[in-house]
Amino acid sequence: MAYFGKAENIKVGTIGYGGAFRMGKFHLDLCAKAGMCPTAVAEIDPARLEEAKKDFPGIETYSSASDMLKKSGVNLVIVITPHNSHARLAIQSLKAGKHVVVEKPMAITTAECDAMIKAASSRKLLLSAFHNRHWDGCIMEAVKRIKSGVIGEVFRIEAHMGSYSQPKDWWRSSRSISGGILYDWGVHLLEYSLQIIDSEIKEVSGFAKTGYWAKHTRWAKDTIEDEGFAVVRFASGAWLTLTITNLDANPKKGQLEITGTKGTYIMSGAEYEIITRQANETRVIRGQNPPSEPWRYYENIANHLVKGEKLVITPEWARRPVHILDLASQSAKRKRALKAKYP
């Protein structure tokens, strides 16, 4: 279904401009590259509004999301705010008749995702989460090679990232704001993995170590876990483990270790390794990953709204990693595995 005659008719506004990583500029630059029109920014920090004016001369600026939604002519709203505000601001924007993109993760809980999906579906509006890393060179190369059969049938993925380091004094280190240690990079590693294991999620077990770093941070008892660990069981019989840790003195190689019946694929940001056994010998093939193509996310959004192109990152797709994270968090507290639930 097409909503606009051409991409330049899509007026884009952001809620939040991003204090870290200059995410507001990053989003709007990609929107402009896709032919859409950066139009407005709503931000509670006056200094960031000044940055937006310098980055995009003539852009409209507002001190609240409500003002932007009422007074600007934006058609597409991008929510660039802490995780615990995604659902509220997305639903507010959808109720105002705007198409919506939210930063990843889509939300903190499955219930929030379902409420967002319902609000978008009932109004026939676009809803998506900014999984631009769907087009990272490392995962595009991994999917291509694994689908060629190089490591056979995939039955296990170990996703991991970590170091031995105290959490920073920013909102991502607050469990109530961010969702927990698994929610930042963990959602990327899950989205990578779900491109490889194409099967229904059946159950999730979660584990957590807490308390070591909490006494050293501004968030005290609300500090994110020292380490989070999840095990995901799929209907196909495959399984996935996810570890994000700030207590690892011996970080593992790569981000994903993908094991199949014929070998193992180790995926890192810049390179990959394929390890197989042939004639009682271990053979290792190493290669460089191609460049990432993050601009393809908003190219797809624009083409969906203008040409009716199939949406790649649907809200249902973005819900899947959040559901795993939500179940893992609940499971760690209840100390038992939890069954997956579908709308």
Image (spheres, rainbow, N blue to C red):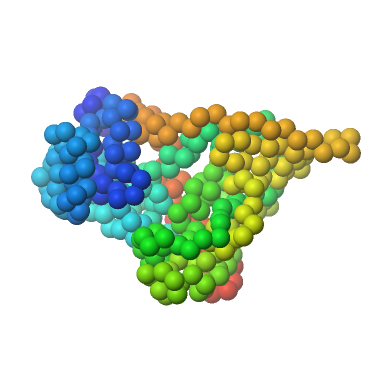
x%, y% of residue 57? 16, 33
Residue plotted at (32% across, 27% down):
33
Question: Taking 198 as reference, is 33 left or right?
Answer: left
Question: Taking 97 as reference, is 326 left or right?
Answer: right
Q: Nearer the viewer, residue 254 or 66?
A: 254
Q: Nearer the viewer, residue 333 or 6?
A: 333
Question: Which quarter of the rendering shows the N terminus?
Answer: top left
Question: Which quarter of the rendering shows the C terminus?
Answer: bottom left
Residue plotted at (59% across, 41% down):
268
Residue plotted at (82% across, 38% down):
282
- Asked where in the image residue 242 lies, by quadrant, the reply is bottom right
Question: Taking 225 as reference, is 93 left or right?
Answer: left
For the question of whether residue 304 can be seen, the reply is no
x%, y% of residue 32? 28, 30
x%, y% of residue 42? 19, 48
**Looking at the image, how many numbered discs can be counted on the residues?**
0
Q: Is residue 162 above or below residue 151?
A: below
Q: Is residue 319 above or below residue 75?
A: below
- Asked where in the image residue 73 lies, by quadrant, the reply is top left
For the question of whether residue 280 can be seen, the reply is yes
x%, y% of residue 341? 50, 59
Q: Is residue 108 above or below residue 125?
A: below
